[in-house]
Amino acid sequence: MSSQPTDSERRALREAAAWHTRLRDHTAAAADDDHRAWQDWHAADPAHQRAWQKVQAVGAQLGRIPAPLARQALGERSRPPRRAVLRSLAAGVGVGSAALLSWRTLPWQEWQATHRTAVGERRDITLPDGSLLALDTGTAVDVEFNDRERLLRLHTGRILVATQPDAQGRRFSVVTSQGRVVALGTRFSVQLQGDGQCHVSVQEKAVRVLPAEGMPRELQAGEQTRFTPLAAEPPVAADPFDASWRDGGLIAVDMPLGTLIAALARYRPGHLGCAPEVAAVRVSGAFPVNDTDRALAALVSRFPLQLRSHTRYWVRVEALERL
C-alpha cells in the first residue's frame, strides 16, 4: 500500500477540504474576505499548497462529469460489450428485487411515511414553505406542517434540509427516536445510524440539538455531533464533504477504506464489506453512489485492492494478492 499521510498532512487535508467547501458555498458578499483569508492560509505552508491541489483534484471529479459519471473518468477497466450488457441487465434486476425485499422488512410507520426512498434511490422535495428536503438512500420521513410548527419525523436513513424563512414564524424541527433537532435558519443533515445514535452535521447557520432526556447543545456551521436520548456528544469539526451524496457521489479525502466501504454499502443491495487488514488504508477520490459497481472498479484500479464476490449480493474488498 502507499505510504500514509503524517498527522500534519492529514490536518492540512482537513483544512483544505474545509476551505474548498467554504469558497464554493459562501455568498458573494463574503467572497472577497474569504478569498483573502484563503490566500493567507495557502501561502503559509507548502503543505497547505499540496493539500489544496489534492482536494481540488478530488472535488472536481464530480463537478466536471455529468451524471451518470463516465466509467473512464473513474478509471474502470474496460469490459467486452456483451459482458457489459449482461452485467447491466443483472444489476437492474437485482436493484428492483432488492428494493422490494427492503420494503417488505420496513416497520409499518416507515411504510406509511409521507416520503421514502429505496436502497440506492435519492430524491429532492420542495416542502410547502419552500424549504428543500433531500432524501438519501433507504430513507423514510413524515412531513407534519400545521399552524404551530414545521415538523419532519425521520424514521430511518438520512436527510438534508435547507430551510426557508416562514411568514407565520413557525419553528422548523426534525424529530427522531433520540430527540429533536431545531433549525436556527440553516442548512443541515440528520442521519439515523445503525448503532442507535443520531448524527447531525451543520453546513450553514446553526441548529439546537435536544436529546429526549438530556441537556441541549447548539451546533454552528462546520460542526457535527451524535446524540442518544440521554446525551449529545461535544461538537467536533464536520466532514466538509458530508453532503456530497446529494450531488451523486461520495467525496473521500484521506478517508479510511472501511469508512468509505460502509458508506457505499448503504447504496447497494446485499452485503458489501471490507477485509480488516485493509480497513485502515487511507484513500481519496470521488465515487458515484448511482453505480456502486463503478465505484468499486475505481478503487481496485487505483489501489492495490481486489474484489471477492459470491454473486453481486456478497462482495468484499481485500488486499490484492501478489503472484
Image (spheres, helix red, strand yellow):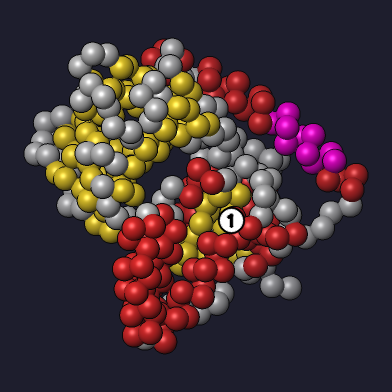
Query: Residue at the location (60% across, 26% down)?
Result: 99
Does dot 1 land on a helix, a strand or a loop?
Answer: helix
Q: Residue furthest left?
A: 215
Question: Residue 293 magenta-drawn?
Answer: no
Query: Residue at the location (32% across, 23% down)?
Result: 153
Vertical relation: 37 (above or below) 94: below
The amino acid pointed to by label 1 is: Gly
Vertical relation: 318 (above or below) 139: below
Residue 312 in which image quadrant: top right
Mark 1 packing: few (<14 Cα in 10 Å), some, or many (20+)? some
Name the foreground residue: 75 vs 202.
202
Question: Where are the magenta residues, as a range?
Answer: 85-94
Residue 233 locus on image (x, y percent): 19, 48
| Dominant SS type (magenta) | helix
Label tally: 1
Residue 28 locus on image (x, y percent): 39, 57
Query: Residue at the location (59% across, 56% down)?
Result: 63
Q: Is residue 191 visible?
A: no
Query: Residue at the location (39% across, 28% down)?
Result: 130
Question: Residue 87 magenta-drawn?
Answer: yes
